[in-house]
Amino acid sequence: MIDRELIKELEAALESAEIESAGFEARQMAEAISKGEILKEQMLKRRMLGEPFQYILGEWEFYGLPMLVGPGVLIPRADTEIAVEKAIELLKGKKGPKVLDVCAGSGCIGIAIAKASDAKVSFLEKSDEAIQYLEKNLELNEVCGKIYRADALKQPPMTESFDLIISNPPYIKTADLGSLQKEVQFEPKMALDGGEDGLVFYREIAKNYKPLINYCGSLVFEIGFDEADEVSKILENEGYKDVTAIRDYGGNMRVVIGTVK
């Protein structure tokens, strides 16, 4: 049983640092401490300095699955789950579909799709640090998947084709990186910086990866809440059909989908 006094102590400390989710984090911290996974003083010190709670725990749940995370990899977020849901819907009825997760990071998107379907998923990621987490998460979730170590802004390194390509690319404008909340600034800039207008990855992926998408296959993008119109235009200009923008469960525009026909 978790020590209630420990929870109260942790919660008070977190509240003093004006951490909004102090109650939730205190319970999670207390559980980790009770299991001997980390010392209380060490955990509190790191959190007080602004380090993301997920990094301190070393693991976070995404789409009901455990994902190992830490410095050097983007933290999986619940907002991204709507992209996974839509991808799974698009794959229904396809036998043994092939999927490519571009800018894969921890691998959470592709792994979730693989666990919820019979898709064969491949992953493309540039960061050596992120790939270390990706490999561990594939093993942890018992998923087999080919990893391409490559830059998403360059020509694709593969020649195979896919029924669906999905990506949560960097989409923060370079000028806005410095104003992000403290916790987010601990995450790798490589996974956040979308260039001057935040759209550089959308343009390059939509153009360069279209030839790899099978007929009636789809490109699924996670987007920033204010980028739906611009990303939709990028897909339309590249010749994608049935371009659709979808809101997440918080009401924000979160996904743009285009089909190759």
Image (tube, rainbow, N blue to C red):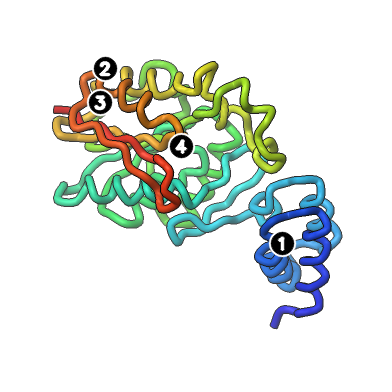
Give the residue pinned by disc 3.
212
In front: 53, or 79? 79
Marks 4 and 3 in Cβ contact (< 8 Å): no
Q: Indicate the position of residue 85 as horizontal and vertical percent values.
A: 33, 51
The answer to which of marks 2 and 4 sits earlier in the sequence is: 4
Nearer to us of marks 2 and 4 is 4
Q: CA distance from mark 4 to mark 1?
A: 26 Å
Q: Indicate the position of residue 173 as horizontal and vertical percent values.
A: 55, 23
Q: Indicate the position of residue 78 as horizontal and vertical percent values.
A: 48, 52
In front: 151, or 196? 196
Residue type for callout 1: Ala
Q: Indicate the position of residue 106 as horizontal and vertical percent values.
A: 52, 43
Residues packed near mark 4 inside 10 Å, few (<14), some (14 to 19) or many (20 plus): few
Residues packed near mark 3 inside 10 Å, few (<14), some (14 to 19) or many (20 plus): some
Against 168, residue 17 (above or below) is below
Secondary structure of residue under mark 2: helix
- Figure quadrant of residue 21: bottom right
Residue type for callout 2: Asn
Nearer to us of marks 1 and 3 is 1
Give the residue pinned by disc 2.
237
Nearer to us of marks 4 and 3 is 4
The answer to which of marks 3 and 2 sits earlier in the sequence is: 3
Q: CA distance from mark 1 to mark 3?
A: 46 Å
Give the residue pinned by disc 4.
225
Marks 2 and 4 in Cβ contact (< 8 Å): no
Residues packed near mark 2 inside 10 Å, few (<14), some (14 to 19) or many (20 plus): few
Position of the N terminus by quadrant: bottom right
